[in-house]
Amino acid sequence: MKERLQELKEEALGKVESAQNLKEVNDVRVAYLGKKGPITEVLRGMGKLSAEERPVIGSLANEVREEIASQIAAKQARLEEEEVERQLASETIDVTLPGRPVKTGNHHPLTAVIEEMEDLFLGMGYSIAEGPEVEKDYYNFEALNLPKGHPARDMQDTFYITEDTLLRTHTSSVQARTMVACEGEGPVKIICPGKVYRRDNDDATHSHQFTQIEGLVVDKDIRMSDLKGTLEVFAKKMFGEEREIRLRPSFFPFTEPSVEVDVSCFKCSGKGCNVCKTTGWIEILGAGMVHPNVLEMAGFDSKEYQGFAFGIGAERIAMLRYGIEDIREFYTNDVRFTTQFKRA
Ligand code: FA5
């Protein structure tokens, strides 16, 4: 029996040694140490042994059992460790590999130009005012010296919602609202960027929805030269220090005198080219001194206070700035177009 146990031990340890994986190790355990295994069988047959032999064989059988069990445990631990090492090796991260580039968004060219203009005016001490896009006829027209039936209302073809409610046709409505809110107390110094709507047919230079930036200054001793100086700074910052502006007489019911403002062409410097349609000048905005009627309707004493106002077409500025030929590009959201622009 001693020999049989010795044989079983060598056999089992050999199989443990040659086992390639945890399953094979477990198979050895079940085969040799399990209830139906040969060692259990030896122990079961102990009854047939003499009283002297029994303890000797019993303790040998236990030693063999323990030796096999400890070798199995050691082999399992080794295989598990090897598995962990294999996994670590296969999952090693090469920290020197360059990362995948992250796609970042861009400012829409129109947003970039609007923010640039906002920064410029904020730097000159203006604050930003806002007003509703669905506006009362009163603020869009009447408070701006355009009573119902006034022929100059036809200058801005309007989307009416009801008889007294409309989509604002210009940001000048915010002028009126801001002045009323000031209850006759100056100074007022605001810009108002925002969307406006007109029943214009869309073409390369017109859109039924576009963006304006309104400017309004009301204070004592405000003169036309203040307006001109402000617009000169604006034009030079937006289009270059060498730019000049010229003021042409115009008409807006809410300003008197009214002007149309041109900037000397940045492409040909005034010689004449396709951008300025050979005139050397490009129109960029409408402006003027706030009409006394407008001041009075808003509660300001027009003998004490004067003001100037201007209305800039933001798309027009962005088109000139970036050489964009069709205003519709701003609204069709083709990424091949929008990704070309970086904030200046
Ligand atoms: C006005 O809207 C006046 N409220 C501007 C003003 C403000 C004058 C304060 C005096 C004092 P006008 O209709 O010209 O003016 O529009 C101003 C600018 O908006 C134009 O110079 C042009 O750049 C732009 N604009 C007008 N209509 C359209 C359109 N359909 N599509 C795109 N831009 C337009």
Image (cartoon, grey):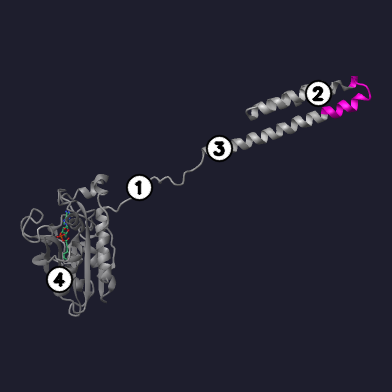
Query: Do tag 1 and tag 2 residues touch (Cβ < 8 Å)?
Result: no
Q: Amino acid at mark 4?
A: Lys
Which residue is at a point 25% across and 66% down the rendered structure image? 120
| Residue tagged 3 | 87
Is-magenta flag for residue 217? no
Res. 5 mark? 2
SS at mark 4 in the image: helix
Label 4, label 2: how far apart the Cα atoms are: 113 Å
Residue placed furthest toward the right: 51
Which range of residues does the magenta coloring cover?
47-61
Crowd around label 3: few <14 · some 14–19 · many ≥20 (10 Å)? few
Query: Do tag 2 and tag 3 residues touch (Cβ < 8 Å)?
Result: no
Query: Do tag 4 and tag 2 residues touch (Cβ < 8 Å)?
Result: no
Identify which residue, 236 or 29, lies in the foreground: 29
Which residue is at a point 63% across and 35% down the rendered structure image? 80
Vertical relation: 162 (above or below) 258:
above
Ligand 1 falls in quadrant: bottom left
Q: Earlier in the sequence, mark 4 or mark 3?
A: 3
Q: Amino acid at mark 2?
A: Leu
